[in-house]
Amino acid sequence: MSDESAIRAVVQQYFDALYQGDVAAFRQAFHPEAQLFSSENAVTAALGLDAWLDRVANRPAPAATGDARIDEIVALAQPSATTAHVRVRDALGANRFIDELLLIKYPQGWKIVCKSWAYENQG
């Protein structure tokens, strides 16, 4: 499998986990020491993976509430043999997001090491 295909597979796992609210699938896609960040409407977040997964586990999954699935890779760049940046668009309920995912290639494969998210400008 090419690096690009492997990166896209991790991002697809991310999209599937987001829609299903699947904590175990997120744990496969993310490095265990991944960090997540946001600053929206004067509310900032800087979370380790476990803290973020607690949020995921305690909110309704879009699949469970019948929400439309919205996920798209907007841009993918691989500046080196072991680093990648993927900008994605996704949704959680009525909220639309732009997520920035940074990935590192480890011996066991590509892992998301950092995520930042922001609300997508709807207007």
Image (cartoon, rainbow, N blue to C red):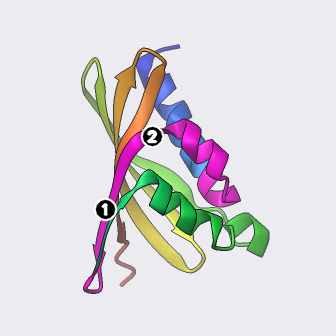
- Image depth: mark 1 or mark 2 in front: 2
Note whether residue 102 is visible: yes
Note whether residue 12 is visible: no
- Give me the residue at 35% from left, 35% from top: 103
92 lies left or right of 112: right
Q: Position of residue 38 (x, y in %)?
A: 31, 68
Whole-number angstrom distance, CA of label 1 to CA of label 2: 15 Å
- Give me the residue at 47% from left, 72% from top: 96
The amino acid at mark 2 is Pro
Magenta span has 28? yes
96 lies left or right of 44: right
Name the residue that disc number 2 marks. 32
Tag 2 secondary structure: strand
Question: In this picture, is 122 found above or below 96?
Answer: below
98 lies left or right of 61: left
- Give me the residue at 38% from left, 45% from top: 34
Q: Which span of residues is magenta-colored?
A: 17-43
Q: Position of residue 13 (x, y in %)?
A: 59, 41
Q: Position of residue 102 (x, y in %)?
A: 32, 41
Tag 1 secondary structure: strand
Query: Are discs 1 and 2 less than 8 Å apart at CB?
Result: no
Q: Quadrant of residue 83?
A: top left
Name the residue that disc number 1 marks. 37
The amino acid at mark 1 is Phe
Estimate how packed mark 2 is, as few (under 14), some (14 to 19) or many (20 or more) residues with alpha carbons within 10 Å. some
- Quadrant where the image shows the C terminus: bottom left
Estimate how packed mark 1 is, as few (under 14), some (14 to 19) or many (20 or more) residues with alpha carbons within 10 Å. some
Question: In this picture, is 105 found above or below 103?
Answer: above
Q: Position of residue 6 (x, y in %)?
A: 50, 24
